[in-house]
Image: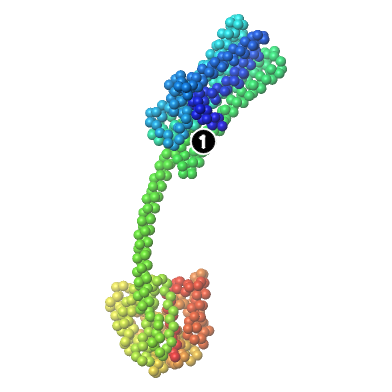
Amino acid sequence: MILTLLRNLAGKTSFGFSVAFISTLWVYPAASYGYYIFYATADIGHEGLNFTIAAIVIGTIAALLIHFIHYGLLYRLGISGFTRTIRNLNQHLSDGFIFSEAYTAEKGTIEELYESVVLLPRNNLAAASGYTLLVIGFLLAGCYVVLGDDLMLIAYILMGGCFTVLIHGYFVFNVTEYLVGPYKERLERVLFRFEMNFRTRYLLSVRNKSIFAILLVFLSMLILTIFIMASEKPLVQIFIFIILSVSTVGLLIYLSTNKIAISLAEINRATKELASGGDGLYFPPYLDRELVTFSNHYNRAAIEINEIRSNLQKRVEERTEELRGAYDRLNVMYRQVQEDMQLAKKIQNRILTRNFNDIKSIKTYIQYYPMSEVGGDIYDITEIRPGYIRVFLADAAGHGVQAALVTMIIKGEYEKVKEMEDPSVLLARLNDSFLDIYEILSVFFSCFIIDLDLNSNRVVYASAGHPDQVMIHAGGVHKLAHTGKLVGIVKGAAYQVNIDEIGSGDRLLLFTDGLFEQFDEKEDVFGEEALRRCVEEGKDLPIEELMYRIITSVDNFVGGKNKISLHDDVTVIGIQVL
């Protein structure tokens, strides 16, 4: 509220006068207290009392008027102050523009202004004390002329006057320091923009101020004691003097503790601001040496922290920009990979035709679930000649693009030999040809070939490391066991041919190992035994219903819809002889 009064009053008159006016308001209680010391100890009679009161009132009014004109009371009329320092303050601080973000001035001007603001509490103390001493001198001269040369009277006047000067000066200094605090802090922030290590100023220390305050309290208590012991005044007047003494001491203590509280609050604000990411600079509102020293050390630490934070932020931004660039490049690459995968998927889907309706003697159902866009399973169903159908199913090691590329090789190599009569000879030739050309790739695959000779009602099959397949014949479930090693392991491998009967209504269930090598959330595998039970339980179902039953069982085991290809590529081929 006092600072608001200062700003408003300065805008209408001048900054210097506003400071002088608000700070010298303490002259009234100080003068009353000093006069009461004089009144309580001196016996001057009624006429002397009236004269001293009149002299004090006239002298105080004159002193205040001179003080106010000195500090710029007539600033708006062209008289801006008695000294260059006051004129400089009134010129730059009266309108409050210093607090605007748009405020600009040369460094030299701001340094001079800063010096004037810092010294203002001391200068105002000197002016207030000097003008108060003039009043005391005027009172002494008047009493000497009117009341005679009473040495005790002069001693009492000096005692009361000196105590008045001490109390009045103490309050003027502290109030002025409080009033100019925001201006000092603002100028320090502006100077900080020009030079981080600008020369800071202080006047006194907290210790010296505390000693002076204690001294005033001691003198007040001493005078109070002397007054009580020596005075012959009525009890009411003694009580009034006690109240004045206690009030004065209380104000002294309040000013000291309030300044400490405000300083701690500012330090707390600065540290919180620094901790929350701000600059956190601290410029003390008061001129105590301890606060100024702390401010210098603290601000250097805050600057280092802000520089580290700025460098860190810069490095984070640079790293973020690098990561953003890498992310963009990865996105481009990802989109390219996706486009390539989509193309590979189209090619693989083209190769893995699922419509074999042109083969009239059988009904075929195919379910294919790759782990990703493309997979490592490949199949082919071809009617070699009327009534003689060959089914080829292979599972390349691995998954994804690598396995899909291998299936392209398998497809190419199989096309070279698929017209051969004997499935075992076909597998042996496929194995040797694959190793001759692609041994350097160190890849291998399992496969299963079965020929349906419907003219003679028999099946001929050979297997290269492929899981046992299933045939449902005459109401029973028959296992079509594997008969040889994986293709691509060793050159010159031999494969065995098995022959079995087949007839109308019989069904074949061909699949890759991904069908039963699926895992639930506990990492338990579905397994071949569970697959066998599913087949046994559904052996009387049409082939498409049996396939649906098996796939649903695996899917439920895994624990989620459409998760059948979670751990491996899956191909299931169902064939029913018409």
Residue at x 70%, y 13% (from the top left corner): 232
Quarter in which the C terminus is drawn: bottom left
Residue that mark 1 sits on: 266
* Residue 296 appears in the figure: no
Q: Nearer the viewer, residue 406 or 548?
A: 548
Residue at x 30%, y 75% (from the top left corner): 439
| Picture coordinates of residue 336, whole percent (x, y) | 35, 65
For the image shown, how many numbered marks are present on the structure? 1
Quarter in which the N terminus is drawn: top right
**Residue 246 quadrant:** top right
Colour theme: rainbow
| Picture coordinates of residue 265, whole percent (x, y) | 54, 36
Q: Nearer the viewer, residue 416 or 425?
A: 416
* Residue 372 appears in the figure: yes
**Residue 493 quadrant:** bottom left
Farthest residue toward the front?
77
Q: Nearer the viewer, residue 112 or 451?
A: 112
Secondary structure under the numbered disc 1 in the rendered image: helix
Residue at x 52%, y 75% (from the top left corner): 556
Residue at x 35%, y 87% (from the top left corner): 423
Farthest residue toward the left?
436
Left or right: 64, with 412 as reference point: right
